[in-house]
Image (cartoon, rainbow, N blue to C red):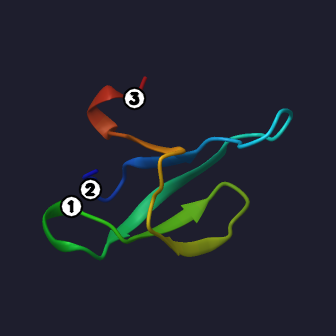
């Protein structure tokens, strides 16, 4: 999984009814786009994430 600053990180809900959590990658802390990432979520919360299998990266070029 590789990302650049400005990409979106989407953590999909793990149980029925749980909403996806979407945030903007504000810092790539790993080498060559690899995790961990500093992410600012829509609610203003900011944290460091090492994405798991329930996570996807939406690259700026593919966003609509």
| Percent of width and height locating residue 63 | 39, 29
Q: Residue furthest left?
A: 32
Q: Residues within 10 Å of mark 1 (few under 14, many from 20)?
A: some
- Tell me if mark 2 has few (under 14), some (14-19) or many (20+) residues whose alpha carbon lies within 10 angstroms of its own: some
Q: Marks 3 and 1, how far apart in space?
A: 18 Å
Would you name the residue on which mark 2 appears? 4
Q: CA distance from mark 3 to mark 2?
A: 13 Å
Name the N-terminal-most of marks 3 and 2: 2
Q: Disc 3 or disc 1, which is closer to the eye? A: 1
Q: Position of residue 50 (x, y in %)?
A: 44, 67
Q: Name the residue located 62 percent from the left edge and 41 percent from the top edge.
A: 12
- Which of disc 1 and disc 2 is earlier in sequence? 2
Disc 3 secondary structure class: loop
Whole-angstrom CA distance, mark 2 to mark 1, is: 6 Å
> Which residue is tagged 1?
33
Question: In what element is the residue under mark 2?
Answer: loop
Total numbered badges shown on the rendered structure = 3
Report the quarter where the C terminus lies.
Answer: top left
Horizontally, residue 36 falls left or right of residue 9, namely left
Find residue 10 and report its horizontal and vertical position in percent. Answer: 54, 45
Q: Quadrant of residue 45?
A: bottom right
The quadrant where residue 60 appears: top left
- Residue underneath mark 3: 63
Q: Is residue 64 above or below residue 12?
A: above
Sequence-wise first label, 3 or 1: 1
Tell me: 31 left or right of 8: left
Residue found 60% across the figure and 73% down from its top: 46
């Amino acid at each position: 999984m590789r990302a650049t600053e400005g990409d979106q990180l989407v953590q999909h809900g793990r149980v029925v009814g749980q909403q996806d959590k979407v945030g903007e990658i504000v810092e790539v802390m790993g080498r060559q786009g690899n995790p961990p990432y500093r992410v600012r979520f829509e609610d203003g919360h900011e944290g460091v994430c090492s994405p798991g299998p329930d996570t996807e990266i939406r690259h700026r070029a593919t966003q609509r």
